[in-house]
Image (cartoon, helix red, strand yellow):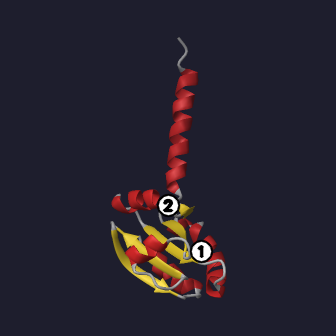
Amino acid sequence: MNRLPFVKHIVGAALLAVSATAFAGEVAFTQASFDQTVSAGLPAVVYLHASWCPTCRVQQPIVDRLSVDPKLKAVTVFIADFDSETKLKRVLKVTQQSTFVVFKNGHEVARSTGQTQEAAIRAVFEKAL
């Protein structure tokens, strides 16, 4: 019996799984995925933004760049809508849009509100590592 096709599928699936976890990047906030990430102790940032917020409009391209930076590839950036995620805002005690809340080893380690300088946002994100 030729096992080569079977082995190719197994190796392909393994490579796909590794590549999917090798880069976390930006994802839409869901409570389940956030809880899973934080309870696993993985580095994460919650970004509470609003489409009408001028500061958020400045931050978004910076977040996009940082999300693909190889140095930050392990960090999952959860994009949460400030207007609709009322429970999340209450739990995290966030009162303003344009807020980043950083988690490392299952605990909040930093937060920033209204920051628009890329170097400062990078420094906050790196606290997750």
Would residue 30 appear left or right of 118 to someone viewing this image? left
Q: Amino acid at mark 2?
A: Thr
The one of 120 and 52 positioned closer to us in this rendering: 52
Badges 2 and 1: C-beta atoms under 8 Å apart? no
Q: Residue at x 42, y 75 (%)?
A: 102
Residue 90 x/y as whole percent: 41, 76
Q: Which residue is mark 2?
A: 30
Residue at position x 33%, y 66% in the image: 106
Q: Which quadrant is the C terminus positioned in? A: bottom left
Give the label on residue 79, or none: none
Of the residues shown, which amino acid type is indicated by label 1?
A: Val
| Viewer-proximal residue among 96 and 114 | 96
Q: Quadrant of residue 44?
A: bottom left
Camera-side mark, 2 or 1: 2
Alpha-carbon span between mark 2 and mark 1: 18 Å
Answer with mark 2 or mark 1, whichever residue precedes in sequence: 2
Judging by the rendered image, the residue that carries numbered circle 1 is: 63
- Image: 43 above or below 51: above
Q: Is 63 situated above or below 116?
A: above
What percent of the width, then of the height, locates residue 109? 36, 77
The percent position of residue 45, horizontal first and vertical second, equals 47, 71
| Numbered-mark total | 2
